[in-house]
Image (cartoon, helix red, strand yellow):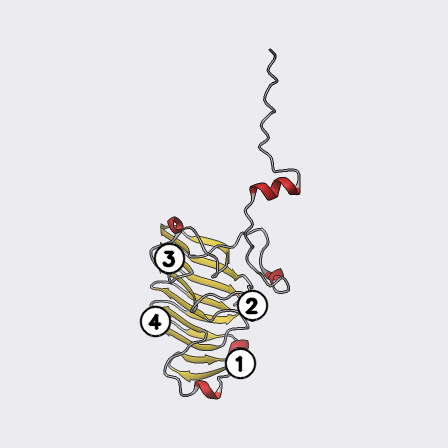
Amino acid sequence: MIVPPDPPFNSGPPKSAEAVEKIVPDVAPPTYDSASSSIVPQHIRPANHISLKSHFGEVKDTFVLDPTLRIPHSMQPRNKKLHFKLKTRMGEAHAVVYIVPSLAQPQGKTRIEVSSRMGTAYLELHAPEVRAPLSIKMSSRLGEATLLLPRSFRGPLRMSTKLGEATLSAGLRASSTIFGNGRVFVGEWRKDEEEKRGWDGDEAFVDSKLGTVHIQYNDEAKA
């Protein structure tokens, strides 16, 4: 009896839609706002709960953040409240972050932290108009701290430095109310927000112990 040989194994992608249907489960993809997603780099896959730490050397990269993305439990960091964290000990912490436009919104705020102990801290943030509120924290003990905000940011901004200068760009100053001592409100507040003890909207805290602090919009000429 002649036994016909097994068909050759094909490691490539299925060639027909029918084959794809049999392999890929029927799960709906995330709903993204295609009209606003053109600013997001298409070659970078969105991620959530991004956490990077370096003891020696700089970290300088571009990231695409989807705060609504659910990730495997084994890949979740210890602090699940943070959606993005970059921390360096000796070296620059430099991040360009794009938040994915999405029809769904995460619970609470999108929390982002960038810090360096002995180096500059830099964050350039791009975000759509419709999104969850942002909570941004930046710090550097020995170096500059620079924050580039999206035009959609509206809320309190606090700057502090012990030995250095804290500056706002011309565009940001024109759209902000400055209260002094590093207290700034970007945009206009509503009447119903005057009596609230807490703040549910955007907020940013930028601190440098021994260095300058500079904040501007991401579409302004970089200082």
Q: Earlier in the sequence, mark 2 or mark 1?
A: 2
- SS class of the residue under badge 4? loop
Please tell me whether mark 1 sits on a helix, a strand or a loop. Answer: loop
Find residue 175 and name its label: 1
Q: Earlier in the sequence, mark 1 or mark 3?
A: 3
Disc 2 to disc 1, C-alpha distance: 18 Å
Mark 2 against mark 4, which lies toward the viewer? 2
Q: Mark number for residue 87?
A: 3
**Amino acid bearing label 1:** Ser
CA gap between label 1 and label 3 equals 30 Å
Closer to the camera, 109 or 212? 109
Q: Earlier along the polypeptide chain: callout 1 or callout 4?
A: 4
In the rendered image, which residue does mark 4 sit on? 163
Q: Residues within 10 Å of mark 4 (few under 14, many from 20)?
A: few
Callout 1 touching callout 3 (CB < 8 Å): no
Mark 1 → mark 4, Cα distance in angstroms: 27 Å
Residue 37 in the image, given as x and y percentages of width and height: 60, 61
